[in-house]
Image (cartoon, rainbow, N blue to C red):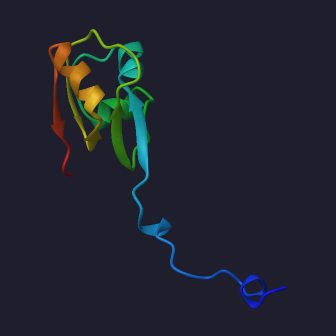
Amino acid sequence: MPLHRRLPKIGFSNKRFGTTFQVVNVGDIQKADLQGDVGPEQLVAAGLARKSGVIKILGDGELTNKVNLTAHAVSRSAREKLEAAGGSFIAHTA
């Protein structure tokens, strides 16, 4: 067997420096019947996210409630659905 196959595979891994998102879909926000100003605290209280971590909103599902959402990140489709329902997105910095 060649030497390069016998030696252990070692090297750099970026895993511990990566960002792990807590995913919340707009359909989940609709099911939880959240309206008005919604931030990470309300998402945790509704059971959609954990207390610590970075929250990202994804566009899976439909949204009819007007929601002014504050989160760390949002996808393009989720932003479009929020704005179509009359709401907005504000980036959470803390």
Does 64 sit left or right of 36 as displayed? right
Q: Residue at x 76, y 90 (%)?
A: 3
Does 11 sit left or right of 84 as displayed? right
Does 70 sit left or right of 15 as displayed? left
Q: Residue at x 31, y 13 (%)?
A: 63
The image quarter containing residue 50 is top left
Please state which of residues 63 and 92 is positioned toward the viewer in this rendering. Answer: 63
- Relative vertical location of residue 93 with respect to residue 34 in this rendering, above or below: below
Please state which of residues 23 and 10 is positioned toward the viewer in this rendering. Answer: 10
Q: Residue furthest right?
A: 1
- Relative vertical location of residue 71 with respect to residue 19 in this rendering, above or below: above
Q: Residue at x 39, y 50 (%)?
A: 53
Q: Residue at x 41, y 14 (%)?
A: 31
Q: Quadrant of the N terminus?
A: bottom right
Residue 44 location, x and y as percent?
Answer: 39, 34
Q: Residue furthest top?
A: 64
Please state which of residues 2 and 74 is positioned toward the viewer in this rendering. Answer: 2
- Relative vertical location of residue 6 with respect to residue 41 in this rendering, above or below: below
- Relative vertical location of residue 21 with respect to residue 45 in this rendering, above or below: below
